[in-house]
Image (cartoon, coloured by chain):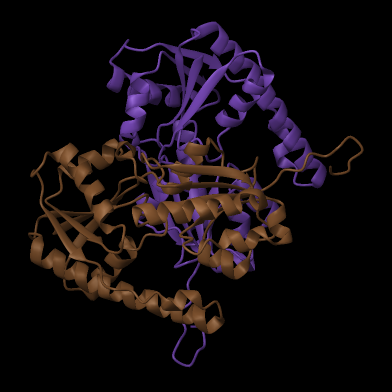
Chain colours: A purple, B brown
Amino acid sequence: MRTLLVVGIGAGDPDQLTLQAVRALARTDVFFVLDKGPAAADLTALRREILDRHLGEGGYRLVAAPDPPRDRAPSEDRSTAGRAAYATAVDDWHARRAELYERMVLDELDDEGTGAFLVWGDPSLYDSTLRILERVAARGRVAFEHQVIPGISSVQSLAASHRLVLNGIGTPVTITTGRRLAESGFPPDVDDLVVMLDGDTAFTALAATDAGADLDIYWGAYLGTDDELLIHGRLPDVAGTITRTRADARRRKGWIMDIYLLRRTPRTPTRDGDRP
Amino acid sequence: MRTLLVVGIGAGDPDQLTLQAVRALARTDVFFVLDKGPAAADLTALRREILDRHLGEGGYRLVAAPDPPRDRAPSEDRSTAGRAAYATAVDDWHARRAELYERMVLDELDDEGTGAFLVWGDPSLYDSTLRILERVAARGRVAFEHQVIPGISSVQSLAASHRLVLNGIGTPVTITTGRRLAESGFPPDVDDLVVMLDGDTAFTALAATDAGADLDIYWGAYLGTDDELLIHGRLPDVAGTITRTRADARRRKGWIMDIYLLRRTPRTPTRDGDRP
């Protein structure tokens, strides 16, 4: 039976690799890589840097394939029909990826071999690899067992760079997407909200609202790399700076990966109980 | 100026240490350890195993101190007054810890030295070390700079062992505490809820409610160690098994650390649109 490893490799700093991940690389026969879009070249280079370092240049076999195209248009539409169209588009894309994974594994990996998918961040957060492997299993054409090696996520990298504890004392933390924030606003019963995958800077619109006036933002991009950018402050004060910094960086590098925490600003009660 | 490193060392498997953490250990002059309670001996031994492995036996200096006692009684009281008493108890405990950290750093670390606090899991989730260092800084008696090295959290370890993606497609994940779950129930607008620090098995009461009937649970204890326990299923079906397994394990080892995901059971619509 084939073994497939889904290995979290951290959020950008090659030193965020765990010892468990290093051992997983060492027992892998074939690495499968799918990247696309403007970040693809840089991300593939960073993966190669990790593999070169731990397995030696030429000391591994890497199979790269172009990621199936994904229909991104529906993500602009926030209506109920738009959400349904988005779910269908994601589903179609997962189906095409499952076919591609199946073919790669059948064509490139021996019956007893070990293949690995290297996942940025952690495989358990907003990553499709595990869902797609479940689809491959359900198609029934290739038998495999799979294991997951956790990795440092961008959520943790953001917290570390800002030296933050994400939760309040005994209170929850919610992790969500930019799309969801744009659709539903800042959740009323949440104090600490981590926002991932916000290509449309949903925090900008929020900054102009009543809810936004009471929020702090801790933003980071290219976390753990030499290009790391960090900005924090009251959301209405720094939203413009973040938007400009983000646009400049994206133009310069050709891509950006960023993440942020929105936190209700703690209000210090004055002695007579009023808020300052 | 002194440097203090707050190093996440993973959720129990020594191989979850990152390369960045290994490098942090190598540049540390003094390791500060505070443990207490029934797990203290095992956890200290596990830390020593990590240090022995990377720095050699006797190749490091470790300063251990007993953790200040914490008044845990208020945590049983779920009223508004009870919540205030809980916050005060935590605040008092942090204040005592800050005094202790300050004394340890002043007494044991040279002016130019590097000290490290080794934190289970990740320093950004339900860990007090960073809050306490902020207090030490605010007291103004010892100048230091501090850095955070992220670690694999038990949240990720749980997801990896169950091979789970924590979020639904485009939907949020909330991380909370057992205390909060017992107080507020399963949040109505949440599909995926990770519960930490649930010494009172709040899921048991939830299993008997209407909300609990629609939940799946993915539970894990001693994650990443030889004693790892994993159970999953419909919450009403497996809550009793988990409670018994948990009590047995706790009796056997003298302590337990566990965590779980509660997930709304996906309902597959039938062809005529009804739910089965």
Near-viewer residue (B260 or A25): B260
Near-viewer residue (B43 or A269): B43
Residue A42, by quadrant, is top left
Location of the N terminus of chain B (image quadrant): bottom left
Residue with the most extreme bottom position: A272
Residue A200, by quadrant, is top right
Q: Name the residue located 55 percent from the left edge and 69 percent from the top edge.
A: A214
Q: Name the residue located 63 percent from the left edge and 56 percent from the top edge.
A: A205
Confirm whether residue B224 shows in the render. yes
The image position of residue B37, as x and y in percent, is 30, 64
The image position of residue B140, as x and y in percent, is 20, 73
Answer with left or right where residue B257 lies relative to residue A106: left
Confirm whether residue B124 shows in the render. no
The image position of residue B248, as x and y in percent, is 44, 53
Compared to B210, does A9 lie above or below? above
Q: Name the residue located 19 percent from the left edge and 47 percent from the top edge.
A: B48
Q: Name the residue located 82 percent from the left edge and 42 percent from the top edge.
A: A81
Compared to B225, does B61 lie above or below? below
Compared to B19, does B128 lie above or below? below
The image position of residue B237, as x and y in percent, is 66, 49
How many marks overall? 0
Near-viewer residue (B207 or A50): B207
